[in-house]
Amino acid sequence: MAKKKKTKYFSHTDRKVLFILLTIVLVFVVYDNRDFLFGIKKTVPETEKNYNHESLINRTEHNYGKEIDRLAGEFGLPAAYLKALVALECSGMKPPGTRFERHVFKRLKKLRDGKISKMENLKMTTVKNVNDDGLKNLATSWGPFQLMGYKCVILGIYVVDIRGDNSLYWGIKWIDLTYGSYLRKGRYRDAFHMHNTGDPFPSNGKSRTFDPDYVDRGLSLMKQFEQLK
C-alpha cells in the first residue's frame, strides 16, 4: 500500500518569513522588558530628575528666596509662582545660564532688513541700526526667568539690565506687565503657559510648550514652595 504523501502546511519560504517575524517580536518583547530581564535602569534627563527634587527647591530658595519674597510683596504677585518659575527656567542656579535662540535671531534679522514689518512688540525702526552681535543679544535668554533679550524693549531698558544685578527685579516687572493679571486671579496654569509661549493654556487641554510637562512641573513646584511657609 502506497504511503500517503504528507501535506506541507508551510513552504520553506513561509517558514523563513515566520521565523523572521517571530524573531522581530521576540526582540521587541525583550527590549520592552529590558529593565526587568537585565536590571538596566532607564536614564532620566537631569532636568526631569531635579524638577521635583528637594535639592532644586532648596537651591532656588537659598539663591533667590528672600529677594523674591520682597519683590513679590512689592508687585503684589505670588512668591511661590515666581520661585517655581525660577526653578523651571534656570534650575535655581546663580548666576543663571543663557540660551541663544537661532530661530529668533533669524526673525530679528528679517525684521531689521525689512523682510517682515513686525515681531511681537518690535518694529523695524526698533532694530534697524542694530548689528548682528546686538541681534544675538536680543535673541538670547537672560536672567533667572530666562527672558529673551528683546523683551527689554517693552520695559524701556537695555539688555544689560535684564542680565545684570537687577535681573530679578526687571524679570518680575516684565511678568507683572505682561500677565500679572492672570496671577492675581489665580490662573497659574495660564501664567506658566504664557511665560513659555506667550499665550494662555489652550482650551483643548494640549500644551504648546516645548517641554510638554512644563506647566505641570511648574504647578507641582509651586505647591512645594507654598509648603515651605
Image: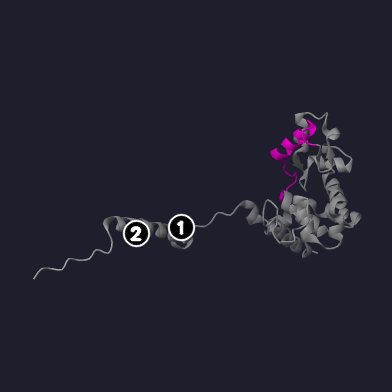
Residue where numbered disc 1 is placed? 31
Residue that mark 2 sits on? 18
Q: At x 84% / y 58%, what residue is drawn?
A: 182
The residue furthest left is 1
Residue 159 falls left or right of residue 2: right
Disc number lying in front (1 or 2): 2
Which residue sits at x=52%, y=57%? 41
Question: Is the residue 139 above or below the residue 65 in the image?
Answer: above
Look at the picture and state if 175 lies above or below 108.
Answer: below
Residue 57: x %, y % from top left: 73, 57
Where's residue 42, x and y in %? Answer: 53, 56
* x and y percentages locating residue 67 in the rendered image: 84, 52
Viewed as shown, does residue 41 lie left or right of 149? left
Q: Secondary structure at mark 2?
A: helix
The three-letter amino acid code for the residue at tag 2 is Leu
Q: Residue furthest bottom?
A: 1
Q: Earlier in the sequence, mark 1 or mark 2?
A: 2
Specify the segment rendered in magenta.
90-116
The answer to whether 104 appears left or right of 2 in the picture is right
Question: In the rendered structure, does residue 96 fall within the stretch colored magenta?
Answer: yes
- Quarter occupied by residue 25: bottom left
Front residue (pair 22, 220): 22
